[in-house]
Image (tube, grey):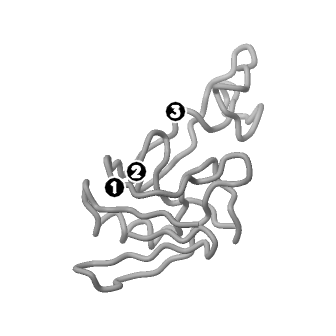
Amino acid sequence: MVIRLGEQKIYFYKAGQLAGISPISSGREGMATRAGNFAVIEKDIDHASSLFGDYVSRDGTVLKREIDVRKDPRPPGALFDAAKMPYFMRITGATGMHEGYLPGYPASHGCIRLPHRMAEIFYRESSVGTPVKIVP
């Protein structure tokens, strides 16, 4: 896989041949997706973030949206509702590729978001060890 941050696109190659292209949304300013050579090191079809999500009340009412547990103190009695990251393919640390919202520009916390159908296909067609190159 080759991710071109400037284009906000991912290119999937199989046996050296281009097999698929998809739009992405990479890391926003201050949380930019890092360029480099990586590989898929973990796959989790129904992954949930341990860092990002919402604080909710016991009845599910959202108390604070889009929190980072490392920075946002939990209100008394609040529960952490982890951000869902279906079809997660980890490439380094907390960074991976997964299904998510694509507004047309970099908007994530560093991950590479894919549209549902493409996340499903790329997840199915990749394996642990699949090379991932991220270029500016």
Q: Secondary structure at mark 3?
A: strand
> Which is closer to the viewer, label 2 or label 3?
2
Residue 29 appears left or right of 70:
right
On the image, numbered disc 1 is attached to which residue? 39
Which amino acid, by three-letter code, is at mark 3? Ser
Give the residue drawn at x 44%, y 77%: 11
Q: Residues within 10 Å of mark 2 (few under 14, many from 20)?
A: many
Quarter of the image for residue 131 reads bottom left
The mark found on residue 50 in the picture is: 3
Camera-side residue: 35 or 83? 35
Which amino acid, by three-letter code, is at mark 2? Ile
Camera-side residue: 58 or 65? 65
Q: Residues within 10 Å of mark 1 (few under 14, many from 20)?
A: some
Q: Where 62 falls versus 135 (above or below)?
A: above
Exactly how many numbered labels are in the figure? 3
On the image, numbered disc 2 is attached to which residue? 91
Find out whether the residues at labels 1 and 2 contact each other: C-beta distance under 8 Å: yes
